[in-house]
Image (cartoon, helix red, strand yellow):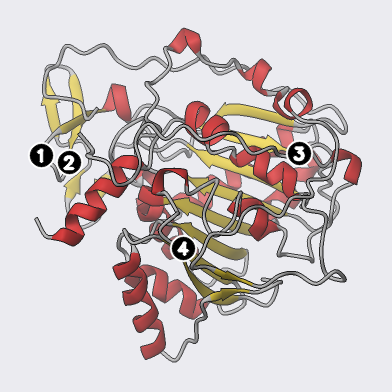
Amino acid sequence: MTGAAVLVAVALTACGSVIKPQQADGGTAPAEMAALDRDRHVSTLAKSPGRRLPGAVVSARSDAAERPPFTMASLDPDPEPVLRQPVVPQQAAPSGRAVTQLVSFDTAPFPFEGTVPNRGPFLDAESGARKGHRTARGGVLWQDQTFGDDRVLLHIPAGFDPRRQAVMVVFFHGHGATLERDVRDRQRVAEQITASGANAVLVAPQFAYDARDSSAGKFWTERGFRNFLDEAGRKLASLRNDTGSARVFARMPVVLVAYSGGFVPAAWSLKDMGADSRMRGVLLLDALYGEEEKFATWIGTARSAFFVSAYTRYTQRHNANLKSMLAARGIASGTELGDSLSRGGVSFLATGSDAVHQDYVTQAWTEFPIKDVLARLPELYVRDPDTVASITPRSRRRERSADADPR
């Protein structure tokens, strides 16, 4: 194995939480999740811009333009399946109150019984009645343990107004992740959207459950991602108890954020969307481990959208490759993040040695990078300051950094 391949394997191993998975009866119930914002936060503007890391150049916003900051499974057929928490029927969002909830989707990436492009059937291993997927590492990930979770994390901040200009943030997690433990609690994605003050909602599907795998599932298929966005619009409207807003969500611009191993479904989703003007932008958080051609093709056809790739040494080579591909096609790129992303553009942000891959969703070129990017879209309606919650940095528990032995 080459040195570069070792770096990729180590970083992808570290992109999930090192905390042991919660038991099915030890997680947070959806009803408790609905109180996430109003119980955890105080209604005050987030004033701290976050700590900048050396290596990434970020233009400061002017005062005039500044917005309120607002296992691997073995072949053993005996392991018990991972049981998911029961899905609670969707509840309407009371006016002015935030809602964060896990909801089942028919169009979620998994379960998936189709074909992997250019490879063959996704479920290509059997043991008795069990079906599984053989990985590139030679192991098997079983469907009932890893690829059976059809839930999606939805978040609507307090004060969200579908009548105003808004965006739908779609977040793709990395390896070894669950929606509750990692996306919601450790990486604080919903909190970042709330704290940005932007008129935005979150849609985050579960991919491989707590496993080292980047499979895209239904997003490999034609219209897979488009169908998912359509259902997301309906489910968000239902969550608000406002079916009329489904039409608004169906047209809402999309900002796609992918972390680490989420690069595969991100690349195929962009291929599915093509030049669709609904794609407002893409943010890769140390996620460019491959698929450069698909990203380059999308960038070339979506000239009005923004593309930001922030990276550590683990994805440096792939970022350099994509930059060269774009230059060969006459597409300019920069190494700075300007005060506004409204006009589109391509930016590659190299972060210094202080950046830790495992923490990258909360600490990249700045603290809370998703919040920072949303704050650089000034055309978005800013919610009532009384509904913008602060976000307080937590002390980091780095049980295993990206440099650690993955074993």
Tell us which disc is closer to us: 4 or 1: 4
Instruction: Report whether residue 40 is seen.
Output: yes
Q: Position of residue 140 (x, y in %)?
A: 16, 32
Quadrant holding the N terminus:
bottom left
Q: Is residue 338 above or below residue 140?
A: below
The residue indicated by pointer 4 is: 351
Q: Earlier in the sequence, mark 4 or mark 1?
A: 1
The CA span between labels 4 and 1 is 33 Å
Assess whether mark 2 and mark 4 are in contact (beta carbons under 8 angstroms): no
Instruction: Report whether residue 214 is seen.
Output: no
Give the amino acid type for the residue marked by disc 2 in the picture.
Answer: Thr
Characterize the local packing of mark 2: few (<14), some (14-19) or many (20 or more) Cα atoms within 10 angstroms: some
The residue indicated by pointer 3 is: 157
Q: Residue at x 53, y 69 (%)?
A: 307
Secondary structure of the residue carrying numbered label 4: loop
Give the amino acid type for the residue marked by disc 4 in the picture.
Answer: Thr
Q: Quadrant of residue 195?
A: top right
Is 394 on the left or on the right of 317, as rendered? right
Q: Earlier in the sequence, mark 3 or mark 1?
A: 1
Give the amino acid type for the residue marked by disc 1 in the picture.
Answer: Gly
The residue indicated by pointer 2 is: 135
Q: Residue at x 13, y 32 (%)?
A: 125
Assess whether mark 2 and mark 1 are in contact (beta carbons under 8 angstroms): yes
Tell us which disc is closer to us: 4 or 2: 4
The CA span between labels 3 and 1 is 43 Å
Q: Nearer the viewer, residue 287 or 394?
A: 394
Q: Nearer the viewer, residue 149 or 60?
A: 60
Q: Position of residue 205 (x, y in %)?
A: 49, 39
The residue indicated by pointer 1 is: 138
Q: Nearer the viewer, residue 396 or 301?
A: 396
Q: Is residue 18 above or below residue 258?
A: above
